[in-house]
């Protein structure tokens, strides 16, 4: 029983984190060119997508996805007392293809930070942005 309480107390104080997907590098995303890059080019550059969707009109939409959520003392009584903090980052890259060529490429990202009860839910100050891949070229 004593070790069980120690584990719970440690989790409550230290918090936790989790990730999903694979983070894409913006310098690589900037190399994707609408009308020029092909599916093979994009997959060679970024690896396999998180998801692939074929639309009724024959276009295909690929998604690369990344999410990271972390909290420190961010749940239960500690969160109610305002002692916890939490962060959430979500990145989505959508690339649309028609006849094997890129027709559209957008990168969306959001970062949220919260404190107290909101930390566990990722509610707080949020920075969001959506850009065309061509805007990331150096």
Image (cartoon, grey):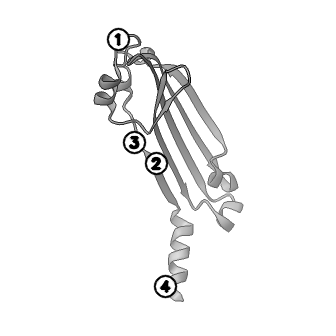
- Measure the alpha-carbon separation of dots 2 and 4: 30 Å
- Measure the alpha-carbon separation of dots 1 and 2: 30 Å
Q: Is residue 64 above or below residue 12?
A: above
The residue wearing badge 3 is: 22
Q: Secondary structure at mark 3?
A: loop
Q: Secondary structure at mark 1?
A: loop
| Residue nearest the observer in this picture, 25 or 61 | 61
Q: Secondary structure at mark 4?
A: helix
Q: Earlier in the sequence, mark 2 or mark 4?
A: 4
Name the residue rendered at 67%, 55% in the picture: 116
Q: Is residue 38 above or below residue 126?
A: above
Q: Earlier in the sequence, mark 1 or mark 4?
A: 4
Q: Earlier in the sequence, mark 3 or mark 4?
A: 4
Nearer to us: label 1 or label 4: 1
Nearer to us: label 2 or label 4: 2
User: In x, y percent, where is residue 9?
Assistant: 55, 74
Judge from the rendering whether residue 39 lies leftward or rightward of residue 74; answer left or right.
left
- Measure the alpha-carbon separation of dots 3 and 1: 25 Å
Q: As drawn, which residue projects farthest toward the right?
A: 80
Classify mark 4: residues with Cα within 10 Å, few (<14), some (14-19) or many (20+): few
Name the residue rendered at 61%, 58% in the picture: 84
Mark number for residue 36?
1
The residue wearing badge 4 is: 3
Judge from the rendering whether residue 5 lies leftward or rightward of residue 82; answer left or right.
left
Q: Is residue 134 above or below residue 54?
A: above
The residue wearing badge 2 is: 20
Q: Is residue 76 above or below residue 42?
A: below
Q: Can you say which quadrant of the picture contains the C terminus?
A: top left
- Measure the alpha-carbon separation of dots 3 and 2: 7 Å
Q: Can you say which quadrant of the picture contains the N terminus?
A: bottom right
């Amino acid at each position: 029983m004593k070790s069980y309480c120690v584990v719970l107390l440690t989790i409550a104080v230290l918090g936790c984190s989790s990730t999903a997907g694979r983070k894409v590098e913006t310098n690589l995303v900037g190399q994707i060119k609408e009308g020029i890059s092909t599916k093979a080019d994009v997959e060679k550059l970024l690896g396999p997508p998180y998801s692939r969707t074929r639309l009724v009109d024959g276009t295909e939409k690929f998604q690369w996805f990344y999410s990271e959520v972390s909290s420190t003392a961010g749940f239960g009584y500690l969160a109610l007392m305002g002692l916890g903090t939490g962060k959430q980052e979500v990145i989505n890259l959508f690339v649309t293809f028609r006849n094997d060529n890129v027709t559209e490429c957008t990168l969306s990202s959001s970062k949220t930070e919260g404190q107290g009860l909101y930390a566990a839910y990722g509610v707080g100050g949020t920075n969001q942005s959506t850009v065309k891949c061509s805007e990331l070229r150096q």
